[in-house]
Image (cartoon, rainbow, N blue to C red):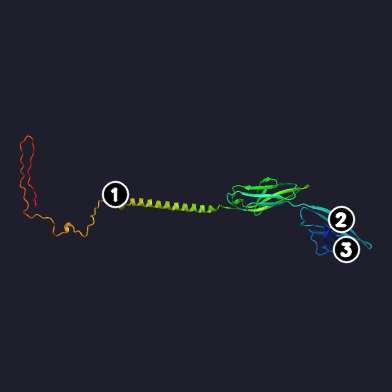
Amino acid sequence: MTPYEQIAEFLVNGVTFKTLQKKQNGCYSAISNVKCLTDSCQCSADGKAYSLKIKDAHPNTILNISCSMKFRFTDQPIFASASISISVLGPLVLKVFGKTVYNSSDMIQISCYMFGNLETYGFDFWSHTVNGVLIRHLKGESNGNLSILAVRQSSYSDSGCYSCNAWNTKGETKYWSNKTTSVVVNDKPGQLFLFGLLVLTGMTVFILTAGVIAVVTKIKSTIGDPNFKQYQPNNRRAIYYAAPEDENTPHVYHRTDPEYEEPSPGHYMEISYINIARNNSTANDYQYEIAHDYIELE
């Protein structure tokens, strides 16, 4: 049987939620006259069946949903309705805690907590992705509703997104949830400086080595030069220099009036012979008598 004017009213917990009406070109809201989208509400082609999707229901609540239609028999309207009760369970909630920026060789540590209406639950492997590409799966240490992921001796390649994957069951249905955080691993601040210092040290050693080699080569080439040999110690001649003179004291050879008396010709005597007398004594001594070849001055 088709409802009156092909209208169906939906109530949630006794309050009108939406009223649908079947028209020739589709299903519409009877109040706003807005055409229904297929993922929100539908009407059957004969106008006898109506469906509604309720979104954003509050977790851990119970929804009493009823559908009411009005029918006409002769002049008396008749209302018919059907109800259903739905329990809305809270979704599995995950929260991720931990630093997002690390330095190279630091230990990455991320914690994942699970909240909600939990009956049977657990954690799966963590996922490491970069730009949406799966890199690897990592096993965390689980303890109750807590899972801790630790990556020791991190490097730049450990940067990316890490997802905590968990599940819980309601009845025979298993639900999956995940929470993702981004991690950046920087290189050590001093690595670039140390690399530059190493390069600078290498250049300095190279320059000093090249300088020493050039000096040694120059010395060897100079020693092999014949012009250099005359300056070697074996070929050097002794050179003597007079001590500097006192300008205020005239040299003895520069004076015109010497302070000594020069002998004049005739003030000497010639030695014509040497008279040697020998005594015939037992001591066999020799006595010599030699005339002086100088004159004494008074």
Instruction: Tell me which residue sits at (42%, 52%) in the image.
Output: 208
Asked whether the beta carbons under mark 3 and mark 1 sit within 8 Å of each other, the answer is: no
Give the amino acid type for the residue marked by disc 1 in the picture.
Pro
Residue 81 vertical position relative to residue 234 in the rendered view, above or below: below
Label 3 crowd (10 A; few <14 / some 14-19 / many >=20): some
| Mark in the foreground, 1 or 2 | 2
Residue 50: image x %, image y %? 84, 58
Q: Nearer the viewer, residue 245 or 298?
A: 298
Residue placed under numbered mark 3 in the picture = 5
Residue 49: image x %, image y %? 85, 58
| Mark in the foreground, 2 or 3 | 2
Give the amino acid type for the residue marked by disc 2 in the picture.
Ala
Instruction: Tell me which residue sits at (60%, 51%) in the image.
Output: 157
The answer to whether 263 appears left or right of 209 in the picture is left
> Total of numbered circles in the picture?
3
Residue placed under numbered mark 2 in the picture = 82
Work out which residue is located at the far top of the displayed protein and give it.
282
Name the secondary structure under disc 3: helix
Tell me which numbered mark, 2 or 3, is placed earlier along the sequence: 3
Give how far apart the Cα atoms at labels 1 and 2 are.
129 Å
Instruction: Tell me which residue sits at (63%, 47%) in the image.
Output: 150
Residue 234: image x %, image y %? 28, 48
Name the secondary structure under disc 1: helix
Label 1 crowd (10 A; few <14 / some 14-19 / many >=20): few
Residue 144, image quadrant: top right
